[in-house]
């Protein structure tokens, strides 16, 4: 035998230690993955946005721009249902679909907070960001008008660009919030604003 009893015991101890370390690493990776995602929508969350913004801002040249489109989804108080939470979750899913249809391949959509979403537009100046925001507005109007009366929500969009409007996520979100404009109402009784 190449291995005696001492060798076998050593291998068992090392094997248990390795298995424990692997389990801890897998648990950490699962936690890290969920820590960066919104549990309700599966979208990347604000912590992920901050990390991606930091990565997009690293080694930025003066002519490079990073823009944010900020989206707020509100219940239409005139049409609020008794099951507000369920309607809002479904409305957020619908709004998310409409936004994704308007974005470019490299644009990233995040759940910012509650009924707020943010789109990170790397290498995008203010003029291009405004064009993407307009395309997003049109996509949302089409998406939500299909649902007509089922989605009693109002949606607003705002745009900000770094470095002119700020150099951090918080500064850009604050600037974009101050510029939020409601969407034009969709046809029928829907309340897309």
Image (cartoon, rainbow, N blue to C red):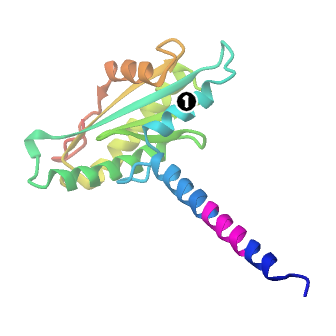
Residue sitting at x 69%, y 21%:
59
Instruction: Please give left or right for residue 116 compared with residue 44 in the image.
Output: left
Q: Nearer the viewer, residue 138 or 5?
A: 5
Q: Residue furthest bottom?
A: 1
Judge by depth and name the residue closer to the eye, 187 or 50: 50
Picture quarter with the N terminus:
bottom right
Where is residue 165? Give x, y as percent: 46, 14
Q: What residue would you read off at disc 1?
A: 53
Residue 141 versus residue 179: which sits nearer the camera? 179
Question: Is residue 17 on the magenta stretch?
Answer: yes
Find numbered disc 1 in the image and state the secondary structure of the residue it sits on.
helix
Q: Which residue corresponds to the image point at 47% horizontal and 28% vertical from the top-left?
A: 68
Residue at the spot 52% in from the left edge and 52% down from the top edge: 33
Magenta range is 12-21
Q: Nearer the viewer, residue 105 or 60?
A: 60
Q: Is residue 40 left or right of residue 125?
A: left
Q: Is residue 178 above or below residue 147?
A: above
Q: Give the image location of residue 192, x and y in percent.
A: 24, 40
Chief secondary structure of the magenta portion: helix
Examine the structure image and report whether residue 102 is included in the region drawn in magenta: no
Q: Quadrant of residue 99?
A: top left
Above or below — where is 174 with respect to 43?
above
Q: Position of residue 98 (x, y in %)?
A: 40, 47
């Amino acid at each position: 035998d190449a291995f005696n009893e001492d060798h076998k015991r050593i291998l068992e101890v090392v094997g248990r230690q390795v298995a424990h370390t692997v389990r801890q690493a897998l648990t950490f990776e699962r936690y890290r993955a969920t820590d960066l995602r919104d549990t309700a929508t599966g979208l990347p969350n604000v912590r992920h946005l901050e990390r991606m913004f930091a990565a997009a801002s690293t080694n930025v040249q003066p002519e490079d721009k990073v823009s944010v489109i900020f989206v707020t989804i509100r219940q239409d108080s005139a049409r609020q249902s008794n099951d507000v939470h369920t309607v809002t979750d479904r409305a957020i899913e619908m709004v998310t679909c409409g936004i994704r249809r308007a974005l470019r391949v490299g644009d990233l959509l995040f759940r910012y907070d509650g009924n707020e979403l943010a789109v990170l537009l790397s290498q995008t100046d203010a003029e291009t960001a405004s064009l993407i925001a307009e395309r997003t507005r049109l996509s949302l109007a089409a998406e939500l008008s299909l649902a007509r009366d089922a989605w009693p929500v109002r949606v607003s969009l705002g745009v900000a660009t770094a470095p002119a409007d700020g150099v951090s996520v918080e500064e850009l979100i604050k600037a974009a919030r101050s510029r939020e404009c409601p969407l034009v109402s969709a046809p029928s009784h829907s309340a897309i604003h």
